[in-house]
Image (cartoon, rainbow, N blue to C red):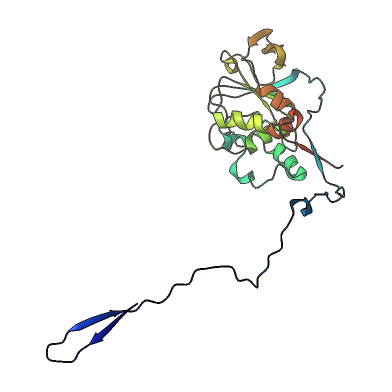
Amino acid sequence: MAAISLSLSPNPSFTTTTTHKPSHALSTPTFLKFPTVSPSTIKSLTYAPLPQTPTPCATFSTHAVASPTPSTTFHGLCYVLDDNIDTDQIIPAEYLTLVPSNPSEYKKLESYALCGLPDAHSTRFVDPGKTKSKYSIIIAGSNFGCGSSREHAPVALGAAGVAAVVAESYARIFFRNSVATGEVYPLESEVRVCEECKTGDVVSIELSESRLINHTTGKEYTLKPIGDAGPVIRTGGIFAYAREAGMIPTLTSS
């Protein structure tokens, strides 16, 4: 350790004195005694699991449910329309407050189907005072179902008793909503069938053969295959199909 002394003379000088302290070596005190441990005295720990009490819980089944073979033939009177029938004509906006999942409001939708058509259509789709339509098949031109994305449009047609629509082409959103809700089959024709059929003609649709038969005129028309959308519509829509196919687990009690 260094010590510094300071001189107060006019010419101060500094001196340094170094002091050394004796060092002490670390050693174990004689009064501390540590016991010796033999390896044979150390016992290993063992693990015993606690008994498990079964807890009741819900289980999920992902097995597809078998469904009966569907009917592939639609038969009835047809209702003929032209091009660009939009969703406002199929179901006006004032009726969109009706909730299709409510059975009583679903029944109200059926009486308003196609009530937005202009007065040029002298033959009404749903007769006054009736809730169901006598026309089970609609034949239309191009761009059927254009306009808004409302799901009420295919729902209203299905509620009114429509099984299928045969059109030259569809607005994409209407086609998708028809498949998602499972209400109607949106079938596409190879030619403009709407120019060769009249409202009230008796027609049949052979879905498996993609064929339309007009029994009134005796003519037949080829339809484009419905493809993978067919089973989805047959089971009642996208959610019903997903449950049947096992894509959505079914909750069952154990």
Residue 122 at what x, y percent from top left?
62, 29
Left or right, residue 72 beside residue 194: right
Looking at the picture, does residue 19 appear above or below residue 66?
Answer: below
Kindly identify the residue that appears in the image at 73 percent across and 57 percent down: 37
Residue 245 at what x, y percent from top left?
74, 28
Looking at the picture, does residue 37 appear above or below residue 177?
Answer: below
Q: Residue furthest left?
A: 10
Residue 137 at what x, y percent from top left?
69, 23
Residue 188 in sight here? yes
Kindly identify the residue that appears in the image at 60 percent across and 40 percent down: 92
Q: Residue furthest bottom?
A: 9
Left or right, residue 182 beside residue 87: right
Kindly identify the residue that appears in the image at 74 percent across and 54 percent down: 38
Residue 160 in sight here? no
Q: Where, quadrant-wise, is the N terminus in this rendering?
A: bottom left
| Viewer-proximal residue among 145 and 52 | 52
Residue 75 at what x, y percent from top left?
75, 18
The image quadrant that residue 160 belongs to is top right
| Viewer-proximal residue among 135 and 23 | 23
Kindly identify the residue that appears in the image at 12 percent across and 91 percent down: 10
